């Protein structure tokens, strides 16, 4: 008998009818002879509602209390689902993250899972129960409630699958798999049957919010096969597993985009050793993560230094650079919050030249100006004005022939 971990996202548990439907799906898996651990998110919209409540009472809200509040969303769904299962004659028990000792570090709102104590869960499974665990939450070494960052229920599910040696971690959501790009932006995007961890990691880290990036990191590290499926319609979904020869060797497997970035430029810095370290040192001291970095070669002994950060960190980073300018008594800071990053991802890129030029030409033909470029072995990213997001993604999707066969 195999152990299966199933995770149901917000829309999949968005009403009591949906929760009842999830109970039926869980029971169908049980009746195939599997042990089942279910991880659920808060009902759709609930986490956003809680965030808004907190922000309306304090700015910024105390981080510890923010986590106490946010963790309540998932507690509602674990109990409702367990009630639905029990009412149907299926023995079940719900647990919060703390009750099953999902131990995390103490970084409130983006904690990382360190350890899971599997004893209680194993005992319940051995007694024939379905175990329902609240996603997105844990507890730190001092007993404080923590949360894992938005989308964190995916990571709870994979961490449980890894800790308990699950045969597969199934992520049930409102799309029937991972697509070549977000089907909300490109309606004729194509569902992928299989992807390797590396591709999904790139897609997630470049902005595809279908899976939280930490969950893919965990799955890859502990070799847990992940499957993304719809809780609304039947189908095979998308299997995400180690790279193997049966995988489609597509040149480009997908297009990811990120609307959450902003760009900053420190204009007119001296072109000499130590400048980049100096500017980014101040940014790092403020705990701001930097994504893309570009430094131009200046003709007059000065240069422009440009980088991107999360939009939430934009104002803070801008002030840091302004202070830097004031301290030096020269130069200037420019910023732009209206940018997006569009990325092509594919392991096939490793062995093919010419992808970048095809990408740049397709964007140029639509009059889309590229502001920044960055590449790695299996991805190419460009920064463009946010008004070009949809046009850019659709153009590239067509240029690389990613659409469904007619
Ligand atoms: P859940 O609440 O179930 O966790 P999410 O909203 O987090 O669901 O993730 C599912 C959504 O991810 C889809 O509705 C879709 O709009 C979006 N998405 C973004 N990129 C992709 C992609 N490449 N393939 C499929 N879905 C994607
Ligand atoms: N409820 C949390 C969120 O909305 C966690 C999750 O759904 O994965 O981000
Ligand atoms: Mg999600």
Image (cartoon, helix red, strand yellow):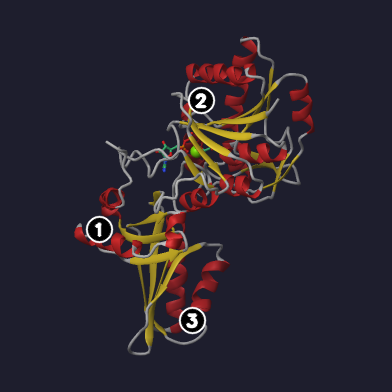
Q: Quadrant of the C terminus?
A: top left
Query: Disc 1 on helix, strand or loop?
Result: helix
Indicate which disc residue 275 carries. Answer: 3
- Mark 3 vs mark 1, foreground winner is 1
Q: CA distance from mark 3 to mark 1?
A: 35 Å
- Mark 1 residue CB less than 8 A from any atom of ligand 1: no
CB of residue at label 2: within 8 Å of ligand 1? Answer: no
Residue 247 in the image: x percent, y percent? 49, 45
Report the residue that reaches farthest toward the bottom.
Answer: 300
Q: Is residue 337 above or below residue 31?
A: below
Horizontal and vertical percent position of residue 91? 69, 15
Instruction: Report the mark closest to the observer, 3 or 2.
Output: 2
Q: Are marks 1 and 2 in contact (CB under 8 Å)?
A: no
Determine which of the numbered discs, if any, sits on residue 362 in the image.
1
Gap between marks 3 and 2, in whole Å?
A: 51 Å
Say the numbered circle drawn on residue 13.
Answer: 2
SS type, badge 3: helix
Mark 3 burial class by Cα count in 10 Å: few <14, some 14-19, many 20+: some
Asked whether mark 3 and ligand 1 are closer than 8 Å, the reply comes as no
Quadrant (top left/top right/bottom left/bottom right) for the N terminus: top right
């Amino acid at each position: 008998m195999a152990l299966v971990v199933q995770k149901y996202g917000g829309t999949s548990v968005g009403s009591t009818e949906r929760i009842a439907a999830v109970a039926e799906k869980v029971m169908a898996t049980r009746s195939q002879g599997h042990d089942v651990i279910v991880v659920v998110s808060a009902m759709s919209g609930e986490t956003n509602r809680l965030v808004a409540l907190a922000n309306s009472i304090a700015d910024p809200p105390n981080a510890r209390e923010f986590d106490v509040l946010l963790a309540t969303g998932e507690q509602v769904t674990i109990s409702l689902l367990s009630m639905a299962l029990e009412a149907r004659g299926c023995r079940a028990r719900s647990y919060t993250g703390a009750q099953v000792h999902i131990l995390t570090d103490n970084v409130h709102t983006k904690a990382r899972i360190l350890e899971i104590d599997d004893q209680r869960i194993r005992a319940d499974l051995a007694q024939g129960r379905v175990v329902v665990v609240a996603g997105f939450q844990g507890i730190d070494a001092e007993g404080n409630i923590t949360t894992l960052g938005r989308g964190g229920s995916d990571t709870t599910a994979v961490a449980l699958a890894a800790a308990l040696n699950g045969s597969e971690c199934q992520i049930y959501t409102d799309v029937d798999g991972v697509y070549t790009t977000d089907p909300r932006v490109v309606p004729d995007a194509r569902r992928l049957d299989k992807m390797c961890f590396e591709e999904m990691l790139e897609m997630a880290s470049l902005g595809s919010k279908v899976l939280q990036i930490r969950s893919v990191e965990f799955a890859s590290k502990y070799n847990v096969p992940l499957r993304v499926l719809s809780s609304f319609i039947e189908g095979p979904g998308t299997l995400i597993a180690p790279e193997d020869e049966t995988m489609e060797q597509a040149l480009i497997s997908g297009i990811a985009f990120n609307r959450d970035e902003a760009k900053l430029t420190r204009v007119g810095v001296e072109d000499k050793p130590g400048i980049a370290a100096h500017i980014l040192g101040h940014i790092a001291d403020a705990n701001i993560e930097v994504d893309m970095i570009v430094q131009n070669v200046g003709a007059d002994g000065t240069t422009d230094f440009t980088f991107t950060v999360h939009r939430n960190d934009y104002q803070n980073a801008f002030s840091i650079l302004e202070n830097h300018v004031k301290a030096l008594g020269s130069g200037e800071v420019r910023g732009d919050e209206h940018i997006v990053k569009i990325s092509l991802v594919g392991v096939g890129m490793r062995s093919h030249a010419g992808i970048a030029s095809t990408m740049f030409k397709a964007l140029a033909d639509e009059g889309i100006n590229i502001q920044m470029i960055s590449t790695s072995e299996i991805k190419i990213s460009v920064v463009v004005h946010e008004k070009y997001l949809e046009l850019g993604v659709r153009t590239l999707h067509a240029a690389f022939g990613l659409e469904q066969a007619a």
